[in-house]
Image: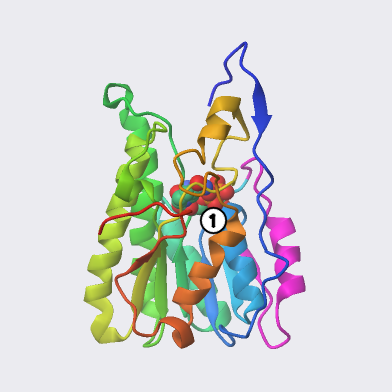
Amino acid sequence: QPQQPGKEYVMCPLPQAINPDYKPSAKLNGKVALVTGGDSGIGRSVCYHFALEGATVAFTYVQGIEDRDKDDTLKMLLKAKSSDAGDPIAIATDVSSEEDCKKVVDQVASKFGRIDILVNNAGVQHYTNLVEEITEAWLVRLFRTNIFGYFFMTKHSLKHMKEGSCIINTASVTAYVGSPHQLLDYLSTKGSIVSFTRGLALRLVDKGIRVNGVAPGPVWTPLQPASQPAYEVEYLGSDVPMRRAGQPYEIAPSYVFLASNQCSSYMTGQVLHPNGGTIVNG
Ligand code: NAD
């Protein structure tokens, strides 16, 4: 987002990965999880919660994106992991490339033997509400990362997933209620992910693989530009009933719930809505 002269700029609050009061209870003991976009924001917090809950965690990251930190995430996961879980691994991956997706999946499966939980989470945002301004280049980038990536990762992971495994897709509240924040092209990708989640869930019922989604409201992460006009930063939570944006740790427990067969064995094709109270239809 280009800075505009004469406007006051403020920094987004630092994304918080964990609520100090969170009490893990071994909900994912013995599970192997693969999380895309695990070096930052929501995905990083999901990885942390999964490790605390006993899972072995592999995550993907993109090399050289400012603000994201895979080394710091790896250190955090090593500290959190339980003694019988494998060491966390981070793999550089561009999810918009099918070849990269196949490589990362095969690498995780050959190291840990299988994939029990796939979290499709890596995503990019782009600001425009004006359909006249949308370029082919941006549409291609958005759709390849936010949609194709979910298809590719799922396609290749399924070979390594058995009955009792699950897939969790990150959607967005904008898929349901639109957005005044210039996100027309972005929210179209997220609507597609809601449909993908429902369709795939039905397709995989007979295999005993559950597929669900999480549709967060606005969350303080590097996805929100680190500096932007102050009015937009305030605006981020202004149409949320709780009048604030969320923190990653307020989103990640929904993934724990959906990943845990103790908690959600009778749920598939559903989307959870940690969004500060926005009422969604459908
Ligand atoms: P983030 O920018 O902190 O994290 C995005 C992650 O995606 C990063 O780890 C990045 O490395 C990865 N990524 C980006 N392009 C990639 C590519 N081509 N290949 C592989 N990985 C790639 O943002 P976040 O807010 O944590 O976003 C995570 C997910 O949550 C996204 O799907 C986003 O659309 C969704 N979401 C975010 C918000 C929000 O307000 N932050 C709200 C609803 C949904």
- Above or below for 136 versus 241: above
In percent of the image, x 59 and y 87: which residue is there?
29
Q: Which residue bears the numbered disc 1?
A: 37
Q: Nearer the viewer, residue 172 or 88?
A: 172
| Label 1 within 8 A of ligand 1 by Cβ | yes
Q: Does the magenta stretch include residue 92?
A: yes
In percent of the image, x 60 and y 43: which residue is there?
222
- Above or below for 76 versus 171: below
User: Which percent across, then down, holds residue 272?
Assistant: 40, 65
- State the extent of the magenta-drawn residues as a range: 64-93
Q: In this view, does 261 lie to the left or right of 188?
A: right
Residue 38 at least partly seen: no
In percent of the image, x 36 and y 31: which residue is there?
137
Report how many numbered discs are placed on residues in the image.
Answer: 1
Q: Is residue 264 left or right of residue 27?
A: left
Residue 185 at least partly seen: yes
Give amino acid for label 1: Gly
User: Which percent across, then down, holds residue 211?
Assistant: 34, 72
- Above or below for 66 versus 40: above
**Label 1 Cα crowd, 10 Å radius (few <14 / some 14-19 / many 20+):** many
Q: Is mark 1 on a helix, strand or loop?
A: loop
Q: Is residue 68 magenta?
A: yes
Q: In this view, does 239 lie to the left or right of 70?
A: left
- Above or below for 26 versus 193: below
User: Which percent across, then down, holds residue 21?
Assistant: 70, 70
**Quarter holding residue 57:** bottom right
In percent of the image, x 32 and y 56: which residue is there?
193
Q: Which of 7 and 78 is in front in this view?
A: 7
Quarter of the picture containing the C terminus is bottom left
